[in-house]
Each structure stands twice: as C-alpha cells, then as structure tokens.
Amino acid sequence: MNKLGLSALVSAFALLSGCGGGSGSSGGSVNVPPTGSTPSPGGSSATIFQASGAGPLVAPIYFDANGNGVIDAGEPAAFTDATGAAGASVAGYLPNQNPPSGATMRLRTFGADSSTGFIVSELSAPRGATVVSPVTTIIDLAGDQTAVRRAFGMLSGPSAIRETTDLLSFAAAQRLNDPDSATAQDAARITAINFRIIALMQLLSRYQGDPVDVGSGAGPEGAQYIASVIQETGSADFSDAGFVLRTLQKGNAIFRYQPEQLDVAAEAFAKFMRSVPTSMSSLQEINGYHLAFRFFVLANIRSVYAGYPSPELARVRALTEADWRAAVARFADALRPVVGSRVYALPDYVELRGTRVLSPATLLRNDVSGFPYSVGGSGKTLTGVTVDPRFFGQVHARLEGGNIELYSSSSFNGYAYFDYTALSGGTETSARVYLQVRQP
C-alpha cells in the first residue's frame, strides 16, 4: 500500500476525531455530523455524499479546498456511515456553491472498503460530484466523463449503462440491491469497473516492496497513469495486455524493471481481468475476486519483479486463465471482515519454503481497531493459531516463544491456510492466513 496514503488516513482520522461535531466550520474546526445524519445549513435541503471503493467506504469525505490532497483544519469534512453515506452539506459547502478563491473543491476520500475490509486510498471526484469512487477518480484526472464512459465500454456492449446514469452522482456500491432492475444492473456494471481500477492502481503502486497483504489502495500516481493512457488511446480495456503494459511503462521511471518483467506482469494481470465478470452484484463476490487478485495474481507478479533474470518469469508466463479461475474459486467463500466493528482482523498471505518463523507483527500490522480507525499491530496480542484439519500432517503452525513456527511436509506443494486469534482492548478477533507452500 502507498505508505503516504496510510499515514494520511491515520492523520485524517485523528484530525476529524479531534474536531467536534459543531454546527459550523469557523475557527478552524471541522464539522463532523453524527453517523447517518444529514445536516442542512440555513434550512436548505441536505446533500448526501457517498463514498465507494468496490463496496461502500467507511471513511472521511472532505472537500480539498486548496488542492493539496490532505485534510487541513477548516476544510469541510465528515465521516460516512456503514453504507458509505455522509450528510454532507458538511460545514456549509454544497456542490453548486462557489468555492473560495483559487480552491479546487475536489471531493476526496480514503477508508475501509466494506466489501473486503482493506483500506482503499487516494480517491477523488471533480467539483460538483456527490459521489467519490475509483471511476470518479479517473474522471477527475482525465477531465471528461464521456471519454471515460467510452474507454470503459459503458456506451455499448456488456458493460453499457444508461445514458441518464451520471457517474458523478450515482452511488454504485449503494445501489446493488435497488428494487429497480435497470438501476441495479448499472450499479453492478460500475462496481465491476471500480474493482478493476482498484486492482490496477494497486499493481501500479510506487511501494512494490510491501507484502501483498498490507493495504489495498495505491498512491495517486496509479490513477494518473490510467487516466493518462485513456487520454492517449481512448481505451481502458484492462483485459488487453497492451493497455496494461502502457500503464506499467508510465511508472517504470520509478520501478526500473526490465522490459520482459513488465511484459510478463502485463500478461498476467490481463489474463486475470478476463476472468472478472462485467457485473459484480454482491460484496461476497467482490471479496473473493479481491483475495484471488491479492494472494495469487499480485503475489505471482511480485515474484516476477523480485529479480532479473529469474525462473519466475517463465513460470508466471506459463500460468493460464484456468489457473486464474481456479484461484477465484479458491477464495469464493472466504469470510468478509465486519467493517465498522471496533476491532477486525484482515487475512494475510505468507510464502513458505521449508520452515519459517513469523513475528506476530507480520500478521497484526494490517488489522484494524478503534474508531477513528488505526491500522497496525500496536495494542494487539496474538493469542493462538489453528491449522485447518484438512491440512493436518501437511502444514504445521504453532505459537512458540511469542512467535509462529511454520513448516510443511516435504511432499506438499500448493495452497493451505491456518487461522489466528488476537486480542485488542479485550476484544477478540480472528483471521485466516493463506499459505503458498513451495518446496525448497
């Protein structure tokens, strides 16, 4: 995950929690309405703002008056509720009001995605929007909603949506179960596009050295690369390795990977995207595809990035679309964290070759606690590990001397998992650790 994004998230939550729920924004305070409220200054009708990743975001929404990408004291801001909505005539600014001189008044957000529990960062929407999401971020950067709709195939074909559906005001994640079938269909198609954008933003993250289980979003540079290629080509076909390669090349001044590494990464990502449906209608479905991406696709791509020349290049290139579909099936029934609870743990990914000793911090550092949320191992204690019976004799995990000792039988290769429990402030939580076992 983009470390700047995570730092900004924690800082922003601290800022918002420290600023009261008053009725105005004078004196540098930030108005934070109670969860689910819809305040309306001066008696005008309230505006509801909504935030989405792939699912609804539990997050701060704020107007970036000076365009610096940070919540500054005095900038209008509010928390969303569990549905991703905020009563956001926040501190008195409505979308159609004139901003202060020189202000951008972009709508920005970053927070916990209800479909997966992971943090999605660095999303924005242009002035006048009431929804902020991955697709509004691309519109904000590309500067043309029609061009973005065309690039993502929303004008015709299997991803088409109605002409009357405004991407800057239609909250897709909140409309998946709409009683109107046409509305629900538009929501499912836009949700699938939001999922694709998040995945490619993560692949384009500047911080490729992070373990794949940490974070979910990426820095703003990923969205900028996507928007830039859309402006150049008019296309955003994520199942096309050529399109993916162009976005990777945009960031290669930072990464400095070899052309073959980029080619293999682009091919792998595009193969996976061909398995992603054009409509995603449930949060459980999103979670399964998300984990398949993080713990199979991204893990394999990062093995390609780890060194050059490398046998990983040929191995990953040889993976087929059937392998990607099998990965999706493997994670289809994975439990979703309860976003909004005081403490929740997130699944992890670990590669095991022979034996390995894990520090508890390795598993706890992406877990979430408190509200405003904090992310990290501080204040959490690992209390136990349990191997699923189906892997008895193949994978061994035990808590010993404060660490987790892992080893596998010499005859086992493939995926396995164990579960852990942890305590935070007297609250117990648990999560699954997915193991990729490869014999030395």
Image: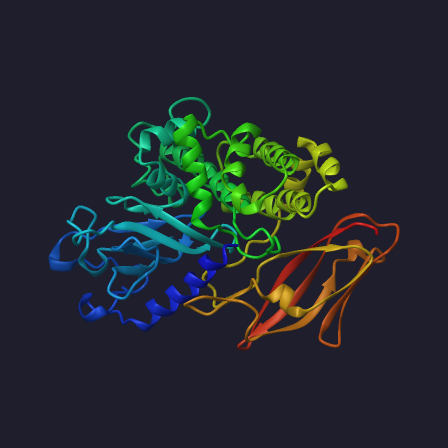
Q: How is the image coloured?
A: rainbow
Q: Residue furthest left?
A: 42
- Could you tell me which residue is drawn at 51 percent across and 33 percent down? 246
- Depth check: give the residue in front, 135 or 232: 232
Where, by quadrant of the figure, is residue 178 drawn? top left
- Could you tell me which residue is drawn at 18 percent across and 58 percent down? 92
Q: Is residue 327 above or below residue 99?
A: above
Question: Residue 364, position in %: x, y?
Answer: 60, 66
Question: Residue 202, position in %: x, y?
Answer: 52, 47
Residue 54 visible in the current orientation? no
Q: Is residue 179 left or right of residue 400?
A: left
- Could you tell me which residue is drawn at 47 percent across and 64 percent down? 341
Q: Is residue 385 above or below residue 295?
A: below
Q: Is residue 282 left or right of residue 353?
A: left
Q: Is residue 191 left or right of residue 303?
A: left
- Could you tell me which residue is drawn at 54 percent across and 57 percent down? 337
Question: Residue 250, position in %: x, y?
Answer: 49, 38
Q: Is residue 102 above or below residue 289?
A: below
- Depth check: give the residue in front, 106 or 398: 106
Where, by quadrant of the figure, is residue 345 drawn? bottom right
- Depth check: give the residue in front, 147 or 188: 147
